[in-house]
Amino acid sequence: MNSDPMNTEPIWKSWFARHGAKLLLFARQQSRRPDEAEDLLQEAFVRIWRLYGHTGEVSPGLVYRAIRRLAIDWARSIDRRQARENRVALDSPLSFSFERTLEQDERKQALLRAVERLPDQQKEVVTLKIWGELTFDEIARTLDESLNTVASRYRYALEKLRDWVPEEMEGKKEDTSQSS
Amino acid sequence: MNEFEKLEAELKELRPLPPSEEFTARLETALGDAGKVAMCCLPEDEDNEQAVSPPSHVTDAHKLISFPRLALYAGLVSGGLAAVWAGVFYLSGLIAPDGPGIEPGMEDAPLVVQNPMPVRPLMRLDDPDSPLHGLSLDQIQDVSVMPVSGWLDPQINERFLRMVDEGVYQQPGGLPARRVRHFFMDETLWSHPASDTRILSTTPREEVFLIELETY
């Protein structure tokens, strides 16, 4: 038996490689500030991994829930509320949270702008469903809402996106023609 | 595909940015020892790596072996071996009576099975006696440079340090009380006589006592 102790890797690294990007996206959405998002994700992940990491498998839903609850707690603190009020100029659009490729077409950009316009409650459901790959049941538990509520929010969000993407594309064309 | 499904597919094509390496390093520091409790084994050599490696487009982190999957592979390999052995015994039972016969003195000779495919272990199985997922007792011994067996039962000792009187405390909805805080140090000592090794763990602890005051 090869007992080379160097031939091992902490499990959390492979777990985080699988789930880190979507957790960070959710944290960005909850905090709305990139610098705070990383703090939020770190705090939530470390808390959950210290509790359940010894099992080698942790449900991502637990970390999503911890991120949301921490975000609410942090928002309640006076210092952070003041920072939140002063943060307008620091806000970054949702598109900065996604990989940008050269071939990213106009429609995808319009799609992201449309997602950005969604109400926060619908946006978080879309984020958890599409990029977090959670079921409606898991989303309901993460957001402390009923199953029907999250499913409705998701449906309304998709209806809005369907209507808004063409608008966004038209708007972009108008902007381009005006600037030229 | 309806329009919503198309929309969902388009959204899924957008990939969120992965966390930066700096952030992952920060996370590793923040996790400390908690990050090292659960480990997984990397492939031992190139052959094994080929045997279990995912497609090249998968990230490096995904090249780590998944234990449930490896357990499945091990189950399949052992199942295959069992089937080969069962087949050989079955065929030997059928053929032997009508066959050329076994030479005298060879009845007890071991049956040699020519396995068409060399079966190599694909993984290191989990050691059921190991307290750490993915590491066997031998590996833990190598990593910790300490023996894993032969330890005596730990000796636990509670050491009282000091007492602090924090004054009168108004209990919510109750009588006023004097609050007294006791400070302890809990000590646990593990001993390994064979290697003359001792490990002492100390944990501070506080206890608060409320002594109700009599009101006149």
Image: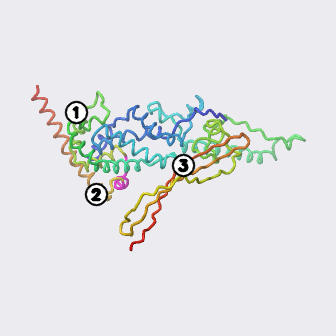
**Rendering coords of residue B49 (x, y %):** 56, 31
Q: Are marks 1 and 3 on the same chain?
A: no
Report the front residue among B130 and B95: B130
**Which residue carries the number 1 mark?**
A106
**Rendering coords of residue B109 (x, y %):** 84, 41
**Quarter occupied by residue A92:** top left
Q: Magenta region, mostly helix, strand or loop?
A: helix
**Quarter occupied by residue A82:** top left
Q: In this picture, is B159 found above or below B199?
A: below
Q: Which numbered tag is attached to residue B44?
A: none
Q: In front: mark 2 or mark 3?
A: 3
Q: Is residue B175 left or right of residue B119?
A: left
Query: Is residue A139 found inside the magenta-colored segment of the image?
Result: yes
Residue in the picture at 34% in, 51% down: A69
**Which residue carries the number 2 mark?**
A149
**Which residue carries the number 3 mark?**
B203
Q: In front: mark 1 or mark 2?
A: 2
Query: Is residue A149 found inside the magenta-colored segment of the image?
Result: no
**Rendering coords of residue B131 (x, y %):** 60, 47
**Rendering coords of residue B112 (x, y %):** 77, 38
Distance from Cα at disc 1 to Cα at disc 2: 32 Å
Disc 1 to disc 2: CB gap under 8 Å: no
Q: Secondary structure at mark 2?
A: helix
Circle nearer the N terminus (1, 2):
1
Q: In this picture, is A155 found above or below A83?
A: below
Image quadrant holding the C terminus of chain B, namely bottom left
